[in-house]
Amino acid sequence: MDADTTRQRIDAAWRERYGQGAAPEALPWNDTIALLMRHHSVRAYKPDPVPEGTLPLLVAAAQSAATSSNMQTWSVVAVSDPGTRAKLAAIAANQKHVEQCPLFLVFLADLSRAGRIGERIGQPMENLPYFETFLVASIDAALAAQNAVVAAESLGLSTLYIGALRNDPEGVATALGLPPGAMGVFGLCVGYADRDVPAGIRPRLPQAAVFHDERYDAGVDADLLASYDATFEGSRHGGGGSWTDRVRNRLGRISQLAGRDGLKPALRRMGFPLK
Amino acid sequence: MDADTTRQRIDAAWRERYGQGAAPEALPWNDTIALLMRHHSVRAYKPDPVPEGTLPLLVAAAQSAATSSNMQTWSVVAVSDPGTRAKLAAIAANQKHVEQCPLFLVFLADLSRAGRIGERIGQPMENLPYFETFLVASIDAALAAQNAVVAAESLGLSTLYIGALRNDPEGVATALGLPPGAMGVFGLCVGYADRDVPAGIRPRLPQAAVFHDERYDAGVDADLLASYDATFEGSRHGGGGSWTDRVRNRLGRISQLAGRDGLKPALRRMGFPLK
Protein backbone atom coordinates (compact mmCIF):
# COMPACT_ATOMS: atom_id res chain seq x y z
CA MET A 1 0.00 0.00 0.00
CA ASP A 2 1.43 3.42 -0.86
CA ALA A 3 2.00 6.09 1.75
CA ASP A 4 -0.91 8.25 0.58
CA THR A 5 -3.39 5.41 0.91
CA THR A 6 -2.10 4.50 4.36
CA ARG A 7 -2.43 8.11 5.44
CA GLN A 8 -6.00 8.22 4.16
CA ARG A 9 -6.85 5.11 6.13
CA ILE A 10 -5.28 6.48 9.30
CA ASP A 11 -7.20 9.72 8.96
CA ALA A 12 -10.46 7.89 8.31
CA ALA A 13 -9.96 5.56 11.27
CA TRP A 14 -9.12 8.46 13.56
CA ARG A 15 -12.15 10.44 12.40
CA GLU A 16 -14.43 7.50 13.11
CA ARG A 17 -12.92 6.80 16.51
CA TYR A 18 -12.89 10.37 17.79
CA GLY A 19 -15.41 12.20 15.60
CA GLN A 20 -13.22 15.30 15.77
CA GLY A 21 -9.58 16.37 15.53
CA ALA A 22 -6.85 14.96 13.33
CA ALA A 23 -4.50 12.02 13.74
CA PRO A 24 -0.89 12.78 14.72
CA GLU A 25 1.38 13.28 11.73
CA ALA A 26 3.52 10.29 12.61
CA LEU A 27 1.48 7.27 13.58
CA PRO A 28 2.58 3.65 13.27
CA TRP A 29 0.05 1.61 11.33
CA ASN A 30 -0.63 -1.96 10.26
CA ASP A 31 -3.60 -4.25 9.71
CA THR A 32 -3.84 -5.34 13.35
CA ILE A 33 -3.97 -1.71 14.50
CA ALA A 34 -6.61 -0.95 11.87
CA LEU A 35 -8.61 -3.90 13.20
CA LEU A 36 -8.39 -2.68 16.79
CA MET A 37 -9.43 0.83 15.85
CA ARG A 38 -12.53 -0.19 13.96
CA HIS A 39 -14.04 -2.19 16.84
CA HIS A 40 -17.63 -1.49 17.64
CA SER A 41 -20.28 -3.32 19.61
CA VAL A 42 -22.85 -5.35 17.69
CA ARG A 43 -26.28 -6.16 19.11
CA ALA A 44 -27.84 -7.96 16.13
CA TYR A 45 -26.43 -11.20 14.78
CA LYS A 46 -27.12 -13.39 11.78
CA PRO A 47 -28.02 -17.00 12.65
CA ASP A 48 -24.98 -18.34 10.76
CA PRO A 49 -22.74 -20.45 12.99
CA VAL A 50 -19.14 -19.45 13.63
CA PRO A 51 -16.58 -21.38 11.53
CA GLU A 52 -15.34 -24.75 12.74
CA GLY A 53 -12.50 -24.41 15.22
CA THR A 54 -13.47 -20.90 16.29
CA LEU A 55 -14.17 -21.86 19.89
CA PRO A 56 -10.79 -23.53 20.64
CA LEU A 57 -9.11 -20.71 18.75
CA LEU A 58 -10.76 -18.06 20.92
CA VAL A 59 -9.84 -19.99 24.06
CA ALA A 60 -6.22 -20.24 22.89
CA ALA A 61 -6.13 -16.51 22.15
CA ALA A 62 -7.61 -15.81 25.57
CA GLN A 63 -5.09 -18.05 27.28
CA SER A 64 -2.29 -16.26 25.46
CA ALA A 65 -3.03 -13.01 27.30
CA ALA A 66 -0.95 -12.09 30.31
CA THR A 67 -2.15 -13.50 33.64
CA SER A 68 -0.99 -12.30 37.04
CA SER A 69 1.95 -14.45 38.24
CA ASN A 70 0.80 -17.06 35.72
CA MET A 71 -1.95 -18.03 38.20
CA GLN A 72 -4.58 -18.23 35.43
CA THR A 73 -7.40 -17.37 37.81
CA TRP A 74 -10.11 -17.34 35.17
CA SER A 75 -12.22 -19.83 33.24
CA VAL A 76 -14.78 -19.64 30.46
CA VAL A 77 -18.08 -21.40 29.82
CA ALA A 78 -19.62 -21.68 26.35
CA VAL A 79 -23.41 -21.82 26.50
CA SER A 80 -25.51 -23.26 23.67
CA ASP A 81 -28.49 -24.74 25.49
CA PRO A 82 -31.54 -22.59 24.69
CA GLY A 83 -32.92 -22.91 28.21
CA THR A 84 -29.68 -21.69 29.77
CA ARG A 85 -29.42 -18.92 27.20
CA ALA A 86 -32.95 -17.80 28.08
CA LYS A 87 -32.07 -17.69 31.78
CA LEU A 88 -28.95 -15.64 31.10
CA ALA A 89 -30.82 -13.27 28.78
CA ALA A 90 -33.47 -12.74 31.46
CA ILE A 91 -30.73 -11.86 33.97
CA ALA A 92 -29.17 -9.48 31.45
CA ALA A 93 -32.24 -7.24 31.21
CA ASN A 94 -33.71 -9.31 28.37
CA GLN A 95 -31.01 -8.52 25.85
CA LYS A 96 -32.23 -10.65 22.95
CA HIS A 97 -28.75 -11.03 21.41
CA VAL A 98 -27.75 -13.19 24.40
CA GLU A 99 -30.16 -15.78 22.97
CA GLN A 100 -29.60 -15.03 19.31
CA CYS A 101 -25.84 -14.91 18.87
CA PRO A 102 -24.35 -18.19 17.60
CA LEU A 103 -21.65 -18.32 20.29
CA PHE A 104 -22.09 -17.09 23.85
CA LEU A 105 -19.24 -17.19 26.33
CA VAL A 106 -19.28 -16.41 30.04
CA PHE A 107 -15.90 -15.38 31.43
CA LEU A 108 -15.37 -16.30 35.06
CA ALA A 109 -13.20 -14.89 37.80
CA ASP A 110 -12.22 -18.34 39.06
CA LEU A 111 -10.49 -18.84 42.40
CA SER A 112 -12.12 -22.24 42.82
CA ARG A 113 -9.39 -24.02 40.85
CA ALA A 114 -6.68 -22.73 43.19
CA GLY A 115 -8.92 -23.71 46.10
CA ARG A 116 -9.16 -27.27 44.75
CA ILE A 117 -5.39 -27.40 44.39
CA GLY A 118 -5.02 -26.31 48.00
CA GLU A 119 -7.41 -29.02 49.15
CA ARG A 120 -5.58 -31.65 47.17
CA ILE A 121 -2.14 -30.78 48.51
CA GLY A 122 -3.36 -29.95 52.01
CA GLN A 123 -2.26 -26.32 51.82
CA PRO A 124 -4.60 -23.63 53.10
CA MET A 125 -4.67 -20.95 50.42
CA GLU A 126 -4.59 -17.97 52.76
CA ASN A 127 -4.72 -15.32 50.04
CA LEU A 128 -7.88 -16.46 48.29
CA PRO A 129 -10.28 -14.55 50.57
CA TYR A 130 -8.70 -11.17 49.87
CA PHE A 131 -10.19 -8.40 47.77
CA GLU A 132 -6.87 -8.21 45.88
CA THR A 133 -7.16 -11.80 44.75
CA PHE A 134 -10.69 -11.28 43.47
CA LEU A 135 -9.44 -8.24 41.58
CA VAL A 136 -6.60 -10.27 40.06
CA ALA A 137 -9.10 -12.86 38.87
CA SER A 138 -11.41 -10.22 37.36
CA ILE A 139 -8.53 -8.54 35.55
CA ASP A 140 -7.22 -11.91 34.33
CA ALA A 141 -10.68 -12.64 32.92
CA ALA A 142 -10.84 -9.24 31.23
CA LEU A 143 -7.41 -9.53 29.59
CA ALA A 144 -8.28 -13.01 28.36
CA ALA A 145 -11.65 -11.92 26.99
CA GLN A 146 -10.20 -8.95 25.15
CA ASN A 147 -7.74 -11.22 23.37
CA ALA A 148 -10.68 -13.43 22.37
CA VAL A 149 -12.46 -10.33 21.06
CA VAL A 150 -9.48 -9.31 18.94
CA ALA A 151 -9.14 -12.85 17.59
CA ALA A 152 -12.86 -13.03 16.78
CA GLU A 153 -12.86 -9.68 15.02
CA SER A 154 -9.76 -10.66 13.03
CA LEU A 155 -11.96 -13.44 11.59
CA GLY A 156 -14.70 -11.02 10.57
CA LEU A 157 -16.87 -11.83 13.58
CA SER A 158 -18.44 -9.23 15.84
CA THR A 159 -18.76 -9.17 19.61
CA LEU A 160 -20.58 -7.64 22.55
CA TYR A 161 -19.68 -7.70 26.23
CA ILE A 162 -22.60 -8.42 28.53
CA GLY A 163 -21.82 -6.80 31.87
CA ALA A 164 -25.48 -7.13 32.84
CA LEU A 165 -24.82 -10.72 33.90
CA ARG A 166 -23.71 -9.03 37.12
CA ASN A 167 -27.34 -8.01 37.71
CA ASP A 168 -27.69 -11.44 39.30
CA PRO A 169 -24.37 -13.26 39.72
CA GLU A 170 -25.98 -15.96 41.84
CA GLY A 171 -28.51 -16.64 39.09
CA VAL A 172 -25.65 -17.01 36.62
CA ALA A 173 -23.83 -19.33 39.02
CA THR A 174 -26.92 -21.52 39.34
CA ALA A 175 -27.51 -21.61 35.59
CA LEU A 176 -23.90 -22.64 34.90
CA GLY A 177 -23.32 -24.86 37.93
CA LEU A 178 -20.47 -22.71 39.23
CA PRO A 179 -18.71 -23.83 42.41
CA PRO A 180 -18.06 -21.36 45.25
CA GLY A 181 -15.16 -19.09 44.30
CA ALA A 182 -16.20 -18.79 40.64
CA MET A 183 -18.22 -15.85 39.33
CA GLY A 184 -19.39 -14.78 35.87
CA VAL A 185 -17.71 -11.39 35.42
CA PHE A 186 -19.34 -10.75 32.05
CA GLY A 187 -20.69 -12.53 29.03
CA LEU A 188 -19.54 -12.21 25.43
CA CYS A 189 -21.70 -12.51 22.33
CA VAL A 190 -19.83 -13.65 19.22
CA GLY A 191 -21.20 -13.97 15.70
CA TYR A 192 -21.64 -12.39 12.29
CA ALA A 193 -23.22 -8.95 12.44
CA ASP A 194 -26.62 -8.56 10.85
CA ARG A 195 -25.74 -5.68 8.53
CA ASP A 196 -29.42 -4.77 8.14
CA VAL A 197 -29.34 -3.39 11.67
CA PRO A 198 -27.34 -0.16 11.96
CA ALA A 199 -24.27 -0.38 14.17
CA GLY A 200 -21.04 1.52 14.19
CA ILE A 201 -18.35 3.30 16.10
CA ARG A 202 -19.40 5.67 18.84
CA PRO A 203 -16.80 8.43 19.14
CA ARG A 204 -14.63 8.27 22.24
CA LEU A 205 -13.40 11.04 24.51
CA PRO A 206 -10.54 13.07 23.04
CA GLN A 207 -7.18 11.63 24.03
CA ALA A 208 -6.38 14.67 26.16
CA ALA A 209 -9.27 13.74 28.47
CA VAL A 210 -7.99 10.23 29.27
CA PHE A 211 -4.25 10.58 28.72
CA HIS A 212 -2.03 12.31 31.27
CA ASP A 213 1.64 13.12 30.87
CA GLU A 214 3.75 12.45 33.99
CA ARG A 215 1.00 13.49 36.43
CA TYR A 216 -2.78 13.48 36.47
CA ASP A 217 -4.33 16.78 35.43
CA ALA A 218 -7.87 17.05 36.74
CA GLY A 219 -8.25 20.53 35.24
CA VAL A 220 -8.30 19.61 31.57
CA ASP A 221 -11.62 18.00 31.04
CA ALA A 222 -14.28 20.73 31.47
CA ASP A 223 -13.63 22.30 28.06
CA LEU A 224 -12.89 19.00 26.38
CA LEU A 225 -16.13 17.47 27.57
CA ALA A 226 -18.22 20.28 26.14
CA SER A 227 -16.85 19.69 22.64
CA TYR A 228 -17.10 15.93 23.11
CA ASP A 229 -20.73 16.23 24.14
CA ALA A 230 -21.47 17.99 20.86
CA THR A 231 -19.50 15.42 18.87
CA PHE A 232 -21.22 12.53 20.62
CA GLU A 233 -24.69 14.00 20.21
CA GLY A 234 -24.08 14.57 16.51
CA SER A 235 -22.70 11.11 15.78
CA ARG A 236 -24.71 8.57 13.84
CA HIS A 237 -24.21 5.86 16.45
CA GLY A 238 -24.27 7.92 19.63
CA GLY A 239 -27.86 6.93 20.26
CA GLY A 240 -29.19 10.41 21.02
CA GLY A 241 -28.34 12.86 23.77
CA SER A 242 -25.01 14.11 24.97
CA TRP A 243 -22.39 11.96 26.63
CA THR A 244 -22.83 13.90 29.85
CA ASP A 245 -26.53 12.98 29.80
CA ARG A 246 -25.62 9.34 29.28
CA VAL A 247 -23.19 9.34 32.19
CA ARG A 248 -25.68 11.15 34.39
CA ASN A 249 -28.38 8.61 33.58
CA ARG A 250 -26.10 5.63 34.11
CA LEU A 251 -24.34 6.77 37.27
CA GLY A 252 -26.78 9.24 38.78
CA ARG A 253 -29.48 6.89 40.02
CA ILE A 254 -29.22 3.63 41.93
CA SER A 255 -32.09 2.14 39.92
CA GLN A 256 -29.69 2.11 36.95
CA LEU A 257 -27.52 -0.41 38.79
CA ALA A 258 -30.33 -2.91 38.14
CA GLY A 259 -29.47 -4.94 41.20
CA ARG A 260 -25.74 -4.52 40.99
CA ASP A 261 -25.83 -2.42 44.15
CA GLY A 262 -26.05 -5.89 45.76
CA LEU A 263 -22.94 -7.23 44.05
CA LYS A 264 -20.73 -7.21 47.14
CA PRO A 265 -23.05 -9.20 49.41
CA ALA A 266 -23.79 -11.56 46.51
CA LEU A 267 -20.08 -12.19 46.01
CA ARG A 268 -19.68 -12.90 49.70
CA ARG A 269 -22.41 -15.53 49.50
CA MET A 270 -20.63 -16.99 46.45
CA GLY A 271 -17.37 -17.66 48.25
CA PHE A 272 -15.54 -14.34 47.84
CA PRO A 273 -15.14 -12.83 51.32
CA LEU A 274 -13.39 -9.78 49.77
CA LYS A 275 -11.28 -9.25 52.87
CA MET B 1 1.20 -19.03 2.27
CA ASP B 2 0.33 -22.59 1.31
CA ALA B 3 -1.79 -24.83 3.49
CA ASP B 4 1.11 -27.00 4.64
CA THR B 5 3.09 -24.00 5.87
CA THR B 6 0.06 -22.58 7.70
CA ARG B 7 -0.50 -25.93 9.35
CA GLN B 8 3.12 -26.07 10.49
CA ARG B 9 2.82 -22.61 12.00
CA ILE B 10 -0.39 -23.50 13.80
CA ASP B 11 1.19 -26.63 15.23
CA ALA B 12 4.30 -24.76 16.33
CA ALA B 13 2.28 -21.98 17.97
CA TRP B 14 0.09 -24.50 19.77
CA ARG B 15 3.08 -26.47 21.01
CA GLU B 16 4.69 -23.32 22.39
CA ARG B 17 1.50 -22.11 24.06
CA TYR B 18 0.53 -25.41 25.67
CA GLY B 19 3.73 -27.45 25.73
CA GLN B 20 1.68 -30.59 25.13
CA GLY B 21 -1.16 -31.87 22.99
CA ALA B 22 -1.98 -31.05 19.38
CA ALA B 23 -3.95 -28.23 17.81
CA PRO B 24 -7.47 -29.03 16.58
CA GLU B 25 -7.57 -30.14 12.98
CA ALA B 26 -9.65 -27.19 11.90
CA LEU B 27 -8.41 -23.94 13.34
CA PRO B 28 -8.90 -20.48 11.81
CA TRP B 29 -5.60 -18.67 11.41
CA ASN B 30 -4.22 -15.30 10.39
CA ASP B 31 -1.36 -12.97 11.29
CA THR B 32 -3.26 -11.27 14.12
CA ILE B 33 -4.03 -14.62 15.72
CA ALA B 34 -0.39 -15.68 15.34
CA LEU B 35 0.60 -12.43 17.06
CA LEU B 36 -1.77 -13.01 19.97
CA MET B 37 -0.58 -16.57 20.46
CA ARG B 38 3.08 -15.73 20.63
CA HIS B 39 2.72 -13.16 23.43
CA HIS B 40 5.10 -13.52 26.30
CA SER B 41 6.18 -11.23 29.11
CA VAL B 42 9.50 -9.43 28.75
CA ARG B 43 11.46 -8.17 31.76
CA ALA B 44 14.59 -6.83 30.02
CA TYR B 45 14.43 -3.95 27.55
CA LYS B 46 16.88 -2.28 25.23
CA PRO B 47 17.28 1.47 25.82
CA ASP B 48 16.05 2.30 22.30
CA PRO B 49 13.04 4.62 22.37
CA VAL B 50 9.70 3.53 20.91
CA PRO B 51 8.99 4.92 17.42
CA GLU B 52 7.46 8.37 17.07
CA GLY B 53 3.70 8.29 17.39
CA THR B 54 3.64 5.10 19.44
CA LEU B 55 2.13 6.70 22.50
CA PRO B 56 -0.93 8.29 20.81
CA LEU B 57 -1.33 5.08 18.82
CA LEU B 58 -1.43 2.96 21.96
CA VAL B 59 -3.91 5.34 23.56
CA ALA B 60 -6.11 5.18 20.45
CA ALA B 61 -5.97 1.38 20.47
CA ALA B 62 -6.83 1.36 24.17
CA GLN B 63 -9.75 3.73 23.65
CA SER B 64 -11.03 1.49 20.86
CA ALA B 65 -11.70 -1.35 23.31
CA ALA B 66 -15.21 -1.85 24.62
CA THR B 67 -16.13 0.17 27.70
CA SER B 68 -19.14 -0.49 29.91
CA SER B 69 -22.09 1.66 28.75
CA ASN B 70 -19.52 3.86 26.99
CA MET B 71 -18.73 5.40 30.39
CA GLN B 72 -14.96 5.26 29.73
CA THR B 73 -14.15 5.01 33.42
CA TRP B 74 -10.39 4.68 32.96
CA SER B 75 -7.41 6.90 32.25
CA VAL B 76 -3.72 6.38 31.59
CA VAL B 77 -0.59 8.19 32.73
CA ALA B 78 2.73 7.94 30.85
CA VAL B 79 5.68 8.33 33.20
CA SER B 80 9.13 9.37 31.96
CA ASP B 81 10.54 11.34 34.90
CA PRO B 82 13.35 9.24 36.44
CA GLY B 83 12.42 10.23 39.98
CA THR B 84 8.81 9.12 39.50
CA ARG B 85 9.94 5.93 37.79
CA ALA B 86 12.19 5.18 40.76
CA LYS B 87 9.30 5.66 43.19
CA LEU B 88 7.08 3.36 41.15
CA ALA B 89 9.82 0.74 40.85
CA ALA B 90 10.32 0.82 44.61
CA ILE B 91 6.61 0.24 45.13
CA ALA B 92 6.71 -2.62 42.62
CA ALA B 93 9.19 -4.70 44.64
CA ASN B 94 12.17 -3.06 42.91
CA GLN B 95 11.43 -4.41 39.46
CA LYS B 96 14.23 -2.77 37.51
CA HIS B 97 12.39 -2.86 34.19
CA VAL B 98 9.94 -0.28 35.58
CA GLU B 99 12.85 2.16 35.44
CA GLN B 100 14.53 0.78 32.34
CA CYS B 101 11.75 0.36 29.80
CA PRO B 102 11.49 3.29 27.37
CA LEU B 103 7.73 3.72 27.85
CA PHE B 104 5.91 3.13 31.14
CA LEU B 105 2.16 3.51 31.40
CA VAL B 106 -0.05 3.39 34.48
CA PHE B 107 -3.63 2.43 33.77
CA LEU B 108 -6.16 3.93 36.15
CA ALA B 109 -9.60 2.90 37.27
CA ASP B 110 -10.94 6.43 37.09
CA LEU B 111 -14.28 7.42 38.60
CA SER B 112 -13.04 10.91 39.32
CA ARG B 113 -13.95 12.18 35.85
CA ALA B 114 -17.58 11.16 36.32
CA GLY B 115 -17.44 12.74 39.77
CA ARG B 116 -16.25 16.02 38.24
CA ILE B 117 -19.07 15.87 35.69
CA GLY B 118 -21.55 15.41 38.51
CA GLU B 119 -20.18 18.42 40.37
CA ARG B 120 -20.31 20.56 37.26
CA ILE B 121 -23.92 19.74 36.44
CA GLY B 122 -25.04 19.59 40.06
CA GLN B 123 -26.04 15.92 39.88
CA PRO B 124 -25.07 13.65 42.75
CA MET B 125 -23.59 10.53 41.13
CA GLU B 126 -25.20 8.01 43.44
CA ASN B 127 -23.64 4.94 41.83
CA LEU B 128 -20.00 5.93 42.13
CA PRO B 129 -19.51 4.59 45.68
CA TYR B 130 -20.59 1.05 44.76
CA PHE B 131 -18.30 -1.95 44.47
CA GLU B 132 -19.86 -2.65 41.07
CA THR B 133 -18.75 0.71 39.72
CA PHE B 134 -15.18 0.18 40.88
CA LEU B 135 -15.25 -3.22 39.19
CA VAL B 136 -16.52 -1.65 35.95
CA ALA B 137 -13.65 0.84 36.05
CA SER B 138 -11.06 -1.87 36.67
CA ILE B 139 -12.41 -4.01 33.83
CA ASP B 140 -12.55 -0.98 31.52
CA ALA B 141 -8.89 -0.31 32.33
CA ALA B 142 -7.96 -3.94 31.67
CA LEU B 143 -9.73 -4.13 28.30
CA ALA B 144 -8.10 -0.87 27.25
CA ALA B 145 -4.65 -1.98 28.35
CA GLN B 146 -4.91 -5.30 26.55
CA ASN B 147 -5.69 -3.52 23.30
CA ALA B 148 -2.62 -1.35 23.87
CA VAL B 149 -0.58 -4.53 24.41
CA VAL B 150 -1.79 -6.06 21.16
CA ALA B 151 -1.07 -2.85 19.28
CA ALA B 152 2.41 -2.59 20.81
CA GLU B 153 3.25 -6.19 19.99
CA SER B 154 2.00 -5.75 16.43
CA LEU B 155 4.77 -3.14 16.12
CA GLY B 156 7.45 -5.53 17.35
CA LEU B 157 7.46 -4.09 20.87
CA SER B 158 7.26 -6.18 24.03
CA THR B 159 5.29 -5.56 27.19
CA LEU B 160 4.92 -6.45 30.86
CA TYR B 161 2.04 -5.82 33.21
CA ILE B 162 3.08 -4.54 36.64
CA GLY B 163 0.39 -5.61 39.09
CA ALA B 164 2.78 -4.90 41.96
CA LEU B 165 1.81 -1.23 41.78
CA ARG B 166 -1.08 -2.39 43.95
CA ASN B 167 1.43 -3.09 46.74
CA ASP B 168 0.97 0.57 47.62
CA PRO B 169 -1.84 2.25 45.66
CA GLU B 170 -1.64 5.37 47.82
CA GLY B 171 2.07 5.72 47.03
CA VAL B 172 1.23 5.48 43.32
CA ALA B 173 -1.52 8.08 43.74
CA THR B 174 0.90 10.46 45.44
CA ALA B 175 3.60 9.92 42.82
CA LEU B 176 1.17 10.61 39.97
CA GLY B 177 -0.96 13.29 41.64
CA LEU B 178 -4.14 11.24 41.34
CA PRO B 179 -7.38 12.78 42.60
CA PRO B 180 -9.73 10.82 44.89
CA GLY B 181 -11.62 8.26 42.82
CA ALA B 182 -8.64 7.38 40.61
CA MET B 183 -6.40 4.38 41.28
CA GLY B 184 -3.48 2.79 39.43
CA VAL B 185 -4.77 -0.70 38.66
CA PHE B 186 -1.50 -1.82 37.08
CA GLY B 187 1.49 -0.52 35.18
CA LEU B 188 2.65 -1.53 31.72
CA CYS B 189 6.24 -1.64 30.50
CA VAL B 190 6.64 -1.16 26.74
CA GLY B 191 9.84 -1.38 24.73
CA TYR B 192 12.10 -3.49 22.57
CA ALA B 193 13.10 -6.75 24.20
CA ASP B 194 16.75 -7.21 25.02
CA ARG B 195 17.23 -10.51 23.18
CA ASP B 196 20.37 -11.26 25.19
CA VAL B 197 18.16 -12.02 28.17
CA PRO B 198 16.19 -15.25 27.76
CA ALA B 199 12.44 -14.84 27.67
CA GLY B 200 9.73 -16.90 26.11
CA ILE B 201 6.32 -18.46 26.34
CA ARG B 202 5.42 -20.26 29.54
CA PRO B 203 2.98 -23.03 28.71
CA ARG B 204 -0.59 -22.48 29.84
CA LEU B 205 -3.08 -24.89 31.39
CA PRO B 206 -4.62 -27.30 28.89
CA GLN B 207 -7.83 -25.92 27.44
CA ALA B 208 -9.90 -28.58 29.17
CA ALA B 209 -8.89 -27.09 32.54
CA VAL B 210 -10.19 -23.59 31.81
CA PHE B 211 -12.90 -24.25 29.23
CA HIS B 212 -16.28 -25.62 30.23
CA ASP B 213 -19.05 -26.71 27.89
CA GLU B 214 -22.53 -25.61 28.98
CA ARG B 215 -21.85 -26.07 32.70
CA TYR B 216 -18.81 -25.83 34.96
CA ASP B 217 -17.16 -29.18 35.63
CA ALA B 218 -15.08 -29.01 38.81
CA GLY B 219 -14.10 -32.65 38.44
CA VAL B 220 -11.85 -32.41 35.41
CA ASP B 221 -8.77 -30.72 36.67
CA ALA B 222 -7.02 -33.14 39.04
CA ASP B 223 -5.63 -35.33 36.24
CA LEU B 224 -5.05 -32.41 33.92
CA LEU B 225 -3.05 -30.51 36.52
CA ALA B 226 -0.68 -33.41 37.10
CA SER B 227 0.32 -33.52 33.44
CA TYR B 228 0.45 -29.72 33.30
CA ASP B 229 2.76 -29.63 36.32
CA ALA B 230 5.19 -31.88 34.47
CA THR B 231 4.92 -29.81 31.29
CA PHE B 232 5.44 -26.58 33.20
CA GLU B 233 8.39 -27.89 35.17
CA GLY B 234 10.04 -29.14 31.99
CA SER B 235 9.56 -25.94 29.99
CA ARG B 236 12.47 -23.66 29.23
CA HIS B 237 10.69 -20.57 30.50
CA GLY B 238 8.74 -22.01 33.40
CA GLY B 239 11.30 -20.75 35.86
CA GLY B 240 11.75 -23.96 37.84
CA GLY B 241 9.28 -25.94 39.93
CA SER B 242 5.82 -27.16 39.12
CA TRP B 243 2.86 -24.91 38.52
CA THR B 244 1.19 -26.24 41.65
CA ASP B 245 4.24 -25.12 43.63
CA ARG B 246 4.03 -21.70 42.07
CA VAL B 247 0.37 -21.34 42.92
CA ARG B 248 0.97 -22.60 46.44
CA ASN B 249 3.76 -20.07 46.95
CA ARG B 250 1.80 -17.19 45.52
CA LEU B 251 -1.56 -17.88 47.17
CA GLY B 252 -0.63 -19.90 50.22
CA ARG B 253 0.94 -17.22 52.40
CA ILE B 254 -0.21 -13.70 53.17
CA SER B 255 3.38 -12.42 53.03
CA GLN B 256 3.20 -13.03 49.27
CA LEU B 257 0.51 -10.37 49.01
CA ALA B 258 3.30 -7.85 49.72
CA GLY B 259 0.92 -5.38 51.29
CA ARG B 260 -1.99 -6.05 48.98
CA ASP B 261 -3.91 -7.55 51.90
CA GLY B 262 -4.48 -3.87 52.69
CA LEU B 263 -5.90 -3.01 49.27
CA LYS B 264 -9.49 -2.61 50.40
CA PRO B 265 -8.85 -0.14 53.24
CA ALA B 266 -6.40 1.73 50.96
CA LEU B 267 -9.07 2.04 48.26
CA ARG B 268 -11.53 3.37 50.83
CA ARG B 269 -9.07 6.06 51.81
CA MET B 270 -8.61 6.87 48.10
CA GLY B 271 -12.27 7.64 47.50
CA PHE B 272 -13.68 4.22 46.66
CA PRO B 273 -16.16 3.29 49.42
CA LEU B 274 -16.81 -0.08 47.69
CA LYS B 275 -20.37 -0.17 48.99
Image (cartoon, coloured by chain):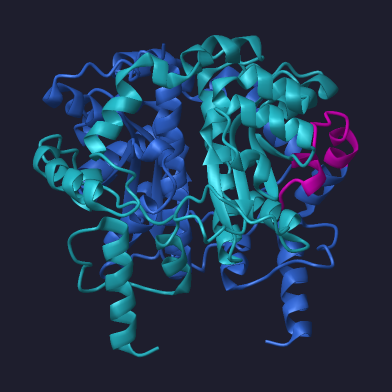
Chain colours: A blue, B cyan
Expressed as whole percent of the image width and height from the top left, the position of residue A35 reads 57, 66
Taking A219 as reference, is B9 left or right?
Answer: left
Q: In this rendering, would B248 be left or right of B105?
A: left
Q: Is residue A36 visible?
A: yes
Report the residue at 77% width, 61% height from top: B53
Considering the image in quadrants, where does the C terminus of chain A appear?
top left
Image quadrant of residue A3? Answer: bottom right
Of residues B242 and B73, the one nearer the viewer is: B242
Q: Is residue A204 above or below residue A49?
A: above
Which portion, as a residue range, is magenta? A203-226
Q: On the image, which quarter does residue B68 sit in?
A: top right
Q: Position of residue A45 (x, y in %)?
A: 42, 61
Magenta region includes residue A212 = yes
Q: In the rendered view of the protein, which quadrant contains the N terminus of chain A?
A: bottom right
In screen coordinates, is B257 left or right of A83?
right
Residue B92 % position (x, y)? 57, 29
Given residues B218 and A43, the one toward you in this image is: B218
- Give the x, y percent position of residue A31: 58, 73
Q: Residue at the spot x=58%, y=51% of the render?
A: B65
Left/right placement of residue A15 relative to residue B136 reads right
Q: Nearer the viewer, residue B80 or B8?
A: B80
Q: Is residue B178 above or below residue B223?
A: above
